[in-house]
Image (cartoon, rainbow, N blue to C red):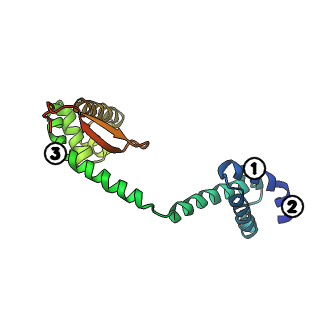
Amino acid sequence: MKLENIWSAYRRQLEAFLHSKVSNAADVEDLLQEILIKTHTGLDSLQKGESIQAWLFQIANRTTIDFYRKKARLKELDPEELWYQEKQQDIKAELIPCIEPFLTALPDDMASLLRAIDLEGKSQKAYAQEKGINYTTLKSKVQKSRATLRGLFEGCCHYSLDPQGNLIDFEQKSASCKKC
């Protein structure tokens, strides 16, 4: 099949697909050009009986993914973002002394589980195998232990989280909280 025939048959569908993934019309046109070039260079690799439409949309999908990866790498750092990261690390450093008293307030099995996985960095799968626990069961125990620990922290402090769930600020509820 000729490239001109393929392109005239599928260009509109590819353009609609790209518009559903990319908001900027100029970027869509650029991506269409990339797809056309990739189609031209890869047409010989198309297997007999293979769906041309599926093949084209695979190229379009991969091209879109590459577009967003490249865009993420080229994004310039905003000095405010660097300040935010620094502040986030400071907040975590301030809370480190608080972790141990809260962990000791947990039941022993929860405390040892969280120490191994969250503080020592042991993988959940490795911990489950080591303790002879079903991996799915362990994941549930980890979530329950984290929720219990969070409840202890929240009993003592007010926390502010960003949209991704990262800690951005905290304030002790009262001076009477002597956990840390």
Amino acid tagged 2: Asn
Badge number at residue 5: 2
Query: Which residue occupies 37% across, 41% down?
Result: 161
Q: Which quarter shows the C terminus?
A: top left
Q: Is residue 106 above or below residue 71?
A: above
Q: Is residue 72 above or below residue 120?
A: below
Badge number at residue 16: 1
Badge number at residue 60: none
Q: Horizontal and vertical percent for residue 62?
A: 63, 58
Q: Is residue 87 left or right of residue 99?
A: right
Q: Is residue 93 above or below residue 67?
A: above
Q: Secondary structure at mark 2?
A: helix
> Badge 3: few (under 14), some or many (20 or more) residues near its Cα, within 10 Å?
few
Q: CA distance from mark 1 to mark 2?
A: 18 Å
Residue 121, visible in the rendered structure? no
Query: Which residue occupies 42% across, 44% down?
Result: 164
**Nearer to me, 105 or 155:** 155
Q: Is residue 82 above or below residue 157?
A: below
Badge number at residue 97: 3
Q: Secondary structure at mark 3?
A: helix
Q: Horizontal and vertical percent for residue 25?
A: 72, 56
Query: Which residue occupies 49% across, 64% down?
Result: 76
Residue 147: quadrant of the picture? top left
Q: CA distance from mark 3 to mark 2?
A: 68 Å
Amino acid tagged 1: Ala
> Badge 1: few (under 14), some or many (20 or more) residues near its Cα, within 10 Å?
few
Earlier residue among tags 1 and 2: 2
* CB atoms of marks 1 and 2 within 8 Å: no
Q: Is residue 45 left or right of residue 125?
A: right
